[in-house]
């Protein structure tokens, strides 16, 4: 039986899917996320597989979506992200998606090309308008040949200019009319571009998800063998024994979505191969399991140390950190993320650093909680001691004694007169007595305590690891 203590018990299964239902069945299995497929066509070239053309079509659709995304970001349009997870479209809907992307790309390219030509014409007419306005002051006699050569050498643009002032005035009026018409057309072109980008921005994230799911489905189908005579696809996959019923249910849903009565078949097969390791996690244990997997994944059915890391990792952090004040701030910050996790998880624009903090919110919560505990033991709150329960020591030295003696110590005896007693007869209720704040060797004492405690905890931690290793040979 699978648990957090050991990885799930796995089985190798053989899957038989008719070509009419294969796409939808793989789509349902992908949404379930409980199956790891094996490549049974490993000897086949990647370009000779059955669905390589479909994968290329998905690549082309992704290219068009990236082009739309680039244009949207260029105009700084907000891309709507509702957080929804749409299902993979049916095969017949893929053609509709392709036509939508093709239409948007062509329209956008045509608008961009028209806008560039219009801007170029607008700039030329603006230059001509300025020339016609200021030409009168330059109508001196010069050698036409040398004038043209100078302009050509500076790559200047040559414009026709009438000789008479009346003709220039008429031409200027005509140019002004053309400029006004161009401004109107440019405004309409920009508005049309904005409408295209607004339409794309509303659906871009959903389109990306749908296209990537289509691509993942066809990539998975390329791992199957195709029996041409029976039109049946044969594949192999690893799955947890406890999830076989869920997988069969997902296959039946795929069959129903395909409007077919051809039953999918899933059979367990015996193998001598090493099964993959699968640890079932939830939102609380996921971060701890990720820490363990970063150092190394346990072998199949080996003891999983993540169960113990839930306590040991935040506790050992707190032993080193040991500040109740800062621990309280960590705890409150993590508690806020836990309480508002549904709202915060819907916000995908926090950035990489924020996602690291949010994904580790339960670790931070426990680290803050344990830090409060160890901080109270060390009597360390924002790097200061606090007299919470009242010290058990009452120094009776006066100023004259303090000025005469270099070293003074507190007398723990309780048999002396009550007025001369320095010790109340009982220890400080919890943690380090705040009277140590007056001591000259406080740092030596606390370092000694922490060093000895570290040795004890280190030995216990090592013994725990050795004990867990013994369970692997049972």
Image (spheres, rainbow, N blue to C red):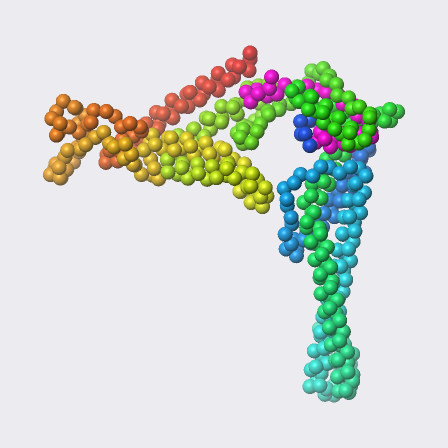
The quadrant in which residue 2 appears is top right
Image quadrant containing the C terminus: top right
Q: Residue 11: x and y, percent?
A: 68, 19
Q: Which residues are magenta?
A: 1-30
> Would you say residue 382 is visible in this rendering?
yes
Name which quarter of the figure residue 60 lies in: top right
Query: Is residue 317 or residue 191 the one in the foreground?
Result: 191
Q: Nearer the viewer, residue 99 or 447?
A: 99
Give the vertical position of 211 relative to 464 (above or below). below
Residue 239 visible in the shown view = no
Residue 184, x across and y down, in percent:
73, 68
Q: Extreme right residue here?
A: 229
Residue at point 49%, 26% (across, down): 309
Residue at far top of view: 474
- On the rendered image, what quadrant is the N terminus found in? top right
Residue displayed at 72% across by 88% down: 140
Residue drawn at (14%, 22%) of the image: 415
Residue positioned 71% across, 50% down in the render? 200
Residue 233 placement: quadrant: top right
Q: Is residue 243 magenta?
A: no
Residue 61 is situated, as x and y percent measured from the top left of the image, at: 75, 44
């Amino acid at each position: 039986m699978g648990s957090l203590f050991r990885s799930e018990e796995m089985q190798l299964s053989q899957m038989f899917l008719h070509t009419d239902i294969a796409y939808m069945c793989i789509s349902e299995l992908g949404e379930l996320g409980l199956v790891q497929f094996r490549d049974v066509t490993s000897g086949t070239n990647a370009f000779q597989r059955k669905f390589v053309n479909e994968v290329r079509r998905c690549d082309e659709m992704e290219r068009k979506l990236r082009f739309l995304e680039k244009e949207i970001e260029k105009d700084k349009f907000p891309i709507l992200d509702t957080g929804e997870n749409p299902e993979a479209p049916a095969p017949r809907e893929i053609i509709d998606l392709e036509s939508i992307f093709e239409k948007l790309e062509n329209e956008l390219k045509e608008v961009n090309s028209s806008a560039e030509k219009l801007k170029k014409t607008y700039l030329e007419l603006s230059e001509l308008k300025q020339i016609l306005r200021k030409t009168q002051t330059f109508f001196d006699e010069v050698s036409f040949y040398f004038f043209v050569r100078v302009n050509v050498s500076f790559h200047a643009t040559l414009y026709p200019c009438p000789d008479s002032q009346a003709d220039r005035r008429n031409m200027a009026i005509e140019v002004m009319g053309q400029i006004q018409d161009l401004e109107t057309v440019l405004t309409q072109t920009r508005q049309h571009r904005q409408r295209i980008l607004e339409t794309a921005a509303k659906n871009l994230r959903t389109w990306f998800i749908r296209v990537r799911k289509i691509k993942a489905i066809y990539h998975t189908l390329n791992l199957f063998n195709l029996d041409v005579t029976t039109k049946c696809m044969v594949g192999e996959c690893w799955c947890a024994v406890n999830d076989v019923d869920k997988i069969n249910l997902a296959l039946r849903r795929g069959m129903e979505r395909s409007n077919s009565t051809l039953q999918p078949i899933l059979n367990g097969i015996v193998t001598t191969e090493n099964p993959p390791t699968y640890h079932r996690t939830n939102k609380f244990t996921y971060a701890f399991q990720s820490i363990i997997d970063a150092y190394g994944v346990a072998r199949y059915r080996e003891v999983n140390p993540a169960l113990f890391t839930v306590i040991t990792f935040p506790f050992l952090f707190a032993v080193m950190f040991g500040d109740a004040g800062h621990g309280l701030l960590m705890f409150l910050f993590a508690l806020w993320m836990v309480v508002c996790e549904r709202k915060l998880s819907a916000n995908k624009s926090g950035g990489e650093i924020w996602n690291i903090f949010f994904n580790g919110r339960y670790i931070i919560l426990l680290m803050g909680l344990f830090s409060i505990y160890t901080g109270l033991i060390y009597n360390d709150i924002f790097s200061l001691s606090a007299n919470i329960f009242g010290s058990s020591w009452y120094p009776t030295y006066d100023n004259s004694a303090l000025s005469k003696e270099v070293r003074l110590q507190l007398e723990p005896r309780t048999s002396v007169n009550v007025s001369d007693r320095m010790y109340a007869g009982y220890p400080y209720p919890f943690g380090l007595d705040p009277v140590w704040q007056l001591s000259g060797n406080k740092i030596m004492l606390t370092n000694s305590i922490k060093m000895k405690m570290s040795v004890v905890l280190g030995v216990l931690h090592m013994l725990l690891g050795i004990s867990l290793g013994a369970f692997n040979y049972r």
